[in-house]
Structure formats: structure tokens, C-alpha cells
Image (spheres, rainbow, N blue to C red):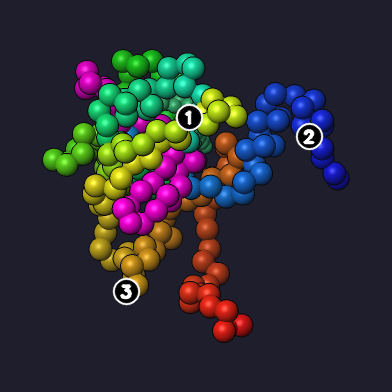
Amino acid sequence: MNILSSDIDSMEKRFRINFINSLPGFKSANLIGTVSNSGIANLAVFSSVIHVGANPPLMGLLFRPVSVPRHTYLNIRETGHFTINHISDYLYKRAHQTSARYPDNVSEFDECGLTPEYTELVNAPYVKEAQIKIGLKLVEEKEIHSNATVFLIGQVEEVILPDSIILEDGVIDIEKARTVTISALNSYHKTELIDRLPYAKTDRE
Ligand SMILES: Cc1cc2nc3c(=O)[nH]c(=O)nc-3n(C[C@H](O)[C@H](O)[C@H](O)COP(=O)(O)O)c2cc1C
């Protein structure tokens, strides 16, 4: 089958969303924790978290067009902080439920059976039940003009995780933390490590 841009244009809306969202392959599975200035904790599932750089330690997330109120986005703009919490296999159903459109005076933590947890450093709630938690401060915002989405970049301020899952070379064994991965907008997958390879060099096969 050879699908052209004109075919994509004529796809039914839901079908097209699912189809296009499947194209990037497996995506990271995280819960973004934020709090409003009035103290309402907010939680939302995001599959767009990516690594931006290690020095300084930066991570980014892509927001759907902010033409309608997006609580996560508004809270980050208000407080300058957010948390990224890995979704483990025992969390995925509760995590998925956070994508429902709850009003701004309702906390997804309460509605989805998760516990907010704060530290001194970061003005945003972590998910107590998560294994790997990252606290960040907002450092940059970029509007993507092609479709009015917004890319936010945060600098890592704090990482909370079990020390037993940090390998000797610094890699985090995310399978040990039972972190899952997402495809499309509704599919949650477990993973299986195939291999760990050395840094690729041209003088090696
Ligand atoms: C699997 C999955 C992945 C999602 N990834 C994103 C994402 O990367 N960016 C985004 O803006 N919304 C994403 N969403 C939608 C948000 O979770 C949803 O809009 C949520 O209601 C936002 O909540 P808020 O208004 O409290 O910020 C995703 C939804 C699902 C189900």
C-alpha cells in the first residue's frame, strides 16, 4: 500500500489522528505534574517528552495548540516548574485517564487515584507512585509556526529514582523501573532489551 498526502487529507478525522500518531514509532510515556498558582495539582499523560541535551541537562515537551486552555501549559507558565514521571506498567490505566478533560478546579491526582508529592526544590507535584521522577524549571518556549503547537524546554533540577537502577556507566535501567512505552494515542507496550552496544566508531564493524 502506498499512501499519499492527498489520501491522508481525505482520511476521516479520528482515523487520521490515529494513523499519523502511529508514524513516529514508540514514544516515551510520562506524566507531567504541575500546580496552579491557586494550588490545584494537575497531571497529564504526554508522549512527546524528548532529550534536548546533557550539558546543561535539558528536556523538552510538545504541546498541542494552546488556542484552548491547556492546564499543564498554563501552570508551567505561571510557576516556571514541572515534573516528568515515568509511567510504569502498574500505572498505565490511571495515567491514561489523566488525558480526560477535567475542569481546572479538579485535580487529576484525585480523579485518577495518584498521590502528589512535593520537594523543596521544585514548585510542581511528583507522582508518588512513579519510580523515576524528574523536576525541571522552564528555560525556553518555542512556537512551532507550521501548526501552532508549542515546544517547552526545561532544565533538570532534581532526579528521584532508586539507586539500584543506575548502571555503572550512568545508564538508567528503565526496564527495571517497569517503564512502558506508547504508540499512537491509546497503545501502551512493555519492552524487552535486545542488547547494549559500545559507542560506535568508524574503525569497528
Ligand atoms: C497517550 C497520550 C499521549 C499524549 N501526549 C500528549 C502530548 O505529548 N502533548 C500534548 O499536548 N497532549 C498530549 N496528550 C493529551 C493530554 O494528555 C490531554 O490533552 C490532557 O487533557 C491535558 O491536560 P491538561 O489540560 O490538564 O494539561 C496525550 C494524550 C494521550 C492519551
Q: Position of residue 2 (x, y in %)?
A: 85, 44
Residue 55: quarter of image = bottom left
Of the 4 image quadrants, the one containing the N terminus is top right
Q: CA distance from mark 1 to mark 3?
A: 39 Å
Residue type at numbered disc 2: Ser
Residue 105 lies in the magenta stretch: no
Q: Position of residue 117 (x, y in %)?
A: 22, 38
Which residue bears the numbered disc 2?
Answer: 5
Q: Position of residue 20 (x, y in %)?
A: 67, 37
**Residue at 57% over, 79% down:** 202
Tell us which disc is closer to us: 1 or 3: 1
Residue 45 appears in view: no
**Residue at 27% over, 43% down:** 135
Q: CA distance from mark 3 to mark 2?
A: 47 Å
- Comparing 139 with 87, the one in front is 139
Provide the residue span drawn in magenta.
Answer: 34-61
Which residue bears the numbered disc 1?
Answer: 143
In the image, is 6 to the left or to the right of 97?
Answer: right
Which residue bears the numbered disc 3?
Answer: 168
Q: Earlier in the sequence, mark 3 or mark 2?
A: 2
- Whether the residue under disc 3 has CB within 8 Å of ligand 1: no
Residue type at numbered disc 1: Glu
Residue 23: quarter of image = top right
Residue type at numbered disc 3: Glu
